[in-house]
Image: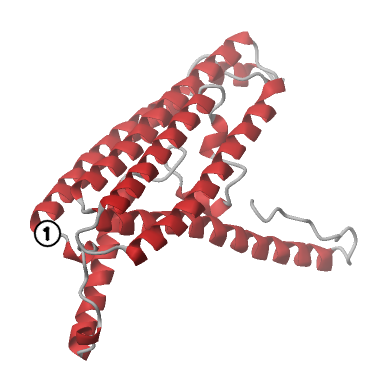
């Protein structure tokens, strides 16, 4: 695990890795929109290539995260580069794999409702026939496979969560709890340091396990659906991720602005120079 002198450097590497991934996702969104717009019936080759590239990019990202987490993983459980909104939604340093499947269900329902509205309004005659099958066209076999995957993923999530709970409970055990009770000093002895290092190593192992589950869930979803459906799913998921990041940032800026205004009123305006909060918090 990282020493205190290197922790800051490692966190900067982790932050850089995250923003590099966000930039890659922004590129993916543009590529997916263009591919879906230009897609023609029975011509799935380009979409298949793009979907495969995106899945591979995600695998590379999780592998890089795993490597960095082995050096120091605490930052991933409450990242400074995230907003409070995002951190409140985290599970094992990222999103729940089961949320991928919830995105599919949401797309299914939304697109089916749109198609029904078009039919009832009799405007679908002027709309080009859907080529390649969108999420609303998932067949019974696909839905059954996705449902089975959903159940399996939730079970694996629960297993990882239980392991995490056990590690958290260990903090209240010897030697950490006894050392905290016996001394007023902030600095722990070597025994405590070793115990905390062991705890962080255990959390890094669990985060790697969670990342593998995230990747395997994504890979299996792509195998079940058509290239068009896979592209729609990936586009929706990436838009959701980037939107949550931006919504959280905007909400925090708005709330911190209010907090600064209240503090200025309470202190008569003393020391109220506006804080420059990063646009990419």
Please determine whether, in this image, residue 229 is positioned above or below residue 208: below
Residue to which mark 1 is pinned: 139
Q: State which quarter of the image contains the N terminus.
A: top right
Q: Where is residue 270 drawn, in percent x and y?
A: 90, 61
Q: Nearer the viewer, residue 87 or 59?
A: 59
Q: Position of residue 116 (x, y in %)?
A: 20, 79
Q: In which image quadrant can residue 72 be found?
A: top right
The kind of secondary structure element at disc 1 is: loop
Q: Nearer the viewer, residue 126 or 229?
A: 126
Q: What's the residue at 35%, 53% (across, down)?
A: 234
Q: Is residue 8 left or right of residue 249?
A: right
The location of residue 64, given as percent across then percent down, is 49, 30
Residue drawn at x 34%, y 65% is 38
Foreground pick, 233 / 74: 233
Q: Position of residue 59 (x, y in %)?
A: 39, 35
Nearer-the-camera pick, 111 or 70 = 111
Task: In the rendered view, tell whether residue 27 sits above or below residue 127.
Answer: above
| Residue 40 against residue 171 in the figure, above or below | below
Is residue 184 something that shows in the picture?
no
In the picture, residue 235 is in which quadrant?
bottom left
């Amino acid at each position: 695990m990282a020493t205190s002198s290197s922790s800051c450097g490692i966190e900067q590497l982790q932050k850089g890795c995250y923003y590099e991934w966000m930039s890659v996702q922004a590129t993916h969104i543009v590529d997916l929109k263009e591919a879906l717009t230009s897609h023609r019936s029975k011509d799935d080759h380009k979409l298949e290539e793009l979907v495969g590239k995106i899945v591979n990019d995600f695998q590379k990202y999780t592998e890089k995260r795993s490597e960095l987490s082995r050096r120091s993983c605490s930052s991933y459980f409450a990242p400074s580069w995230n907003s409070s909104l995002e951190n409140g939604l985290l599970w094992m340093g990222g999103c729940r794999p089961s949320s991928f499947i919830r995105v599919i269900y949401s797309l299914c329902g939304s697109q089916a409702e749109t198609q029904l509205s078009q039919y009832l309004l009799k405007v679908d005659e002027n709309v080009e026939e859907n080529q390649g099958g969108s999420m609303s066209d998932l067949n019974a076999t696909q839905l059954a496979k996705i449902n089975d995957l959903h159940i399996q993923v939730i079970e694996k999530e629960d297993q990882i969560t239980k392991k995490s709970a056990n590690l958290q409970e260990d903090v209240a055990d010897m030697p950490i709890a006894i050392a905290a009770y016996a001394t007023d000093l902030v600095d722990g002895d070597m025994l405590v340091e070793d115990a905390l290092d062991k705890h962080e190593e255990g959390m890094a192992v669990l985060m790697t396990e969670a990342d593998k589950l995230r990747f395997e869930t994504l890979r299996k979803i792509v195998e079940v659906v058509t290239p068009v459906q896979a592209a729609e799913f990936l586009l929706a998921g990436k838009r959701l991720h980037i939107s949550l990041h931006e919504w959280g940032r905007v909400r925090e800026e708005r709330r911190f602005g209010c907090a600064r205004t209240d503090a200025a009123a309470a202190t008569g305006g003393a020391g109220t120079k506006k804080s420059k909060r990063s646009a990419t918090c």
